[in-house]
Amino acid sequence: MNTWKLRGLGCIVGLGLAIGLAPQASRADGIVYVVSGGAGNQTGNDWANAKDLQAALQSAASGTEIWVKHGIYRPTTGTNRTASFTLPNGIKLFGGFAGAETSRQERNPQQHPSILSGDLLGNDAGAANQNNATRGDNSHHVVYCINKPDSILIDGFVIRGGQATSQIFPLNMGGGLLADRCNLTILNSALISNAALFGGGILNLDSTLTLDQSIIAGNWVLSTGGGIENQQAGIVNLRSTVFVGNISQQNTVSAIANAGGTLNLHNSIVWGNNGIAPINGSNNNRNLTVSYSIVQGGFVGTGNSSADPQFVDADGADNVIGTLDDNMQLQANSAARNAGNTSLLPTDQTDLDGDGNIAEPIPFSIDYLPRINEGLVDMGPYEYQGNEPTITPTPSITPSPTTTATATPTQTPTATVMTSETPSPTATTGTPVIPLTNLIYLPAVTR
Ligand SMILES: [Ca+2]
Ligand SMILES: [Ca+2]
Ligand SMILES: [Ca+2]
Ligand SMILES: [Ca+2]
């Protein structure tokens, strides 16, 4: 596909570059506090005197930790669509605060979402796509990172409403995030309802990107990579993440496109995306590794499955994928339950449990519940918290004396279900065979 390489067009447009602004001293704890629009004297030294987010980013030295209260943050109060949240070198950005916390462990991003929104006029309605008139005012990229070698962290945010549908490079790629020569980690976040000609949610260009325990849903792309596209020498590691309801308008690669570089996907779920293939890579998927993941239609690799992950309600009460009411938690009979690989969990680099140990496996899921239940980790960002036995569907054949058709409470759920379930042709619970072409997007929900 000749659309893989776009970089040569050059003409990198400077977006909101923080030039000439010397880093400002903040109080001894080194934390900069942020609320929408700022508060008090806007020094950023505490919640009562918080900065606005753009002001905090434009003055942050490498190593700065920024705490962001819940609320909606837009790159500009004006109408300049090239405005983005441009990331400075080496910062750590934490969202999900109610606005009174004194420790990071007190926050909960799902209860108190910090939303980075490209919707400058606040009028977005309906699904993301190129022709949605309510998106015509939106920023091209919500978050933009260019040429920042020091490690940057984004933890606990919703990123939505990017509209990189211009014909001009790079305003045609990376609606939620454009990462160009950066080193970026995103944790416990959601990139939802963004649009672009290439890389609807994320375009990773010559960057090292780690995306852990996150949600990539309802993003739209004209061509390839509705959820994420990796280009050039980019290195992408995706773990415990869901890709749901991402759309390729041209019906090609809807969720994950590895156009260059290296991409790894582990302990994740790719479901309900359209197109010829939800995942694809250049050179016959060379440098594309998928393991312990559910991929609709199947994908080669250790521990992979094509069985329905059985989300609780993937598109939520509003029946629109990519909004805040989406629920990608797992039902009891989800094939993702206990089917992940614990050794592939991220480390607790932000010390979510506050025990001082950042080398241990991450202790909590995206909703701050125990990451491992029943002794085995689940695929995706959520962990099923119940403990009832998984019911093996009863075959329509009469069990032979050497087989048992129903689950016993003492069995190990995952291994037994994954290996013993062999539905007969007449079984009603088998995974439907899904053609790889002309998939019509149907969220995997039970209403
Ligand atoms: Ca809008
Ligand atoms: Ca929804
Ligand atoms: Ca820890
Ligand atoms: Ca589990």
Image (cartoon, helix red, strand yellow):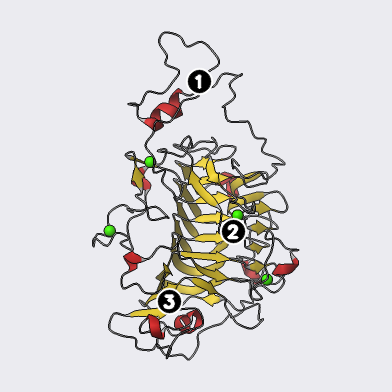
Q: Considering the numbered disc 3 on the image, is that residue within a helix, a strand or a loop?
A: loop
Q: CA distance from mark 3 to mark 1?
A: 56 Å
Lateral position of residue 141 relative to residue 240, left or right: right
The residue singled out by tag 3 in the image is 89
Question: Residue 182: horizontal and vertical position, in percent?
Answer: 47, 69
Number of marks present in the image shown: 3
When the figure is inspected, residue 178 is found, relative to residue 47, above or below; the finding is above
First reached walking from the N terminus: tag 2 or tag 3: 3
Q: Considering the numbered disc 2 on the image, is that residue within a helix, a strand or a loop?
A: loop
Question: Residue 95: horizontal and vertical position, in percent?
Answer: 43, 69
> Residue at left 64%, top 76%?
120
Query: Are the residues flagged by discs 2 and 1 in contact, CB closer than 8 Å?
Result: no
Q: CA distance from mark 2 to mark 1?
A: 37 Å
Q: Foreground residue, 331 or 301?
A: 331
Label 2 CB-ligand 2 distance < 8 A: yes
Q: Is residue 206 visible?
A: no
Q: Quadrant of residue 196?
A: bottom right
Q: Foreground residue, 169 or 108?
A: 108
Q: Considering the numbered disc 1 on the image, is that residue within a helix, a strand or a loop?
A: loop
- Please identify the quadrant where the C terminus is shown: top right
Amino acid at the residue labelled 1: Thr
The residue singled out by tag 2 in the image is 323
Where residue 394 is drawn, which disc sits there?
1
Amino acid at the residue labelled 2: Thr
When the figure is inspected, residue 406 is found, relative to residue 281, above or below; the finding is above
Label 3 CB-ligand 3 distance < 8 A: no
Query: Are the residues flagged by discs 3 and 1 in contact, CB closer than 8 Å?
Result: no
Question: Residue 363: horizontal and vertical position, in percent?
Answer: 32, 53
> Residue at left 65%, top 81%?
80
Q: Which numbered disc, 2 or 3, marks the residue closer to the eye?
A: 2
Query: Are the residues flagged by discs 2 and 3 in contact, CB closer than 8 Å?
Result: no
Local crowd size for mark 2, using a 10 Å CA cut-off: few (<14), some (14–19), many (≥20): many
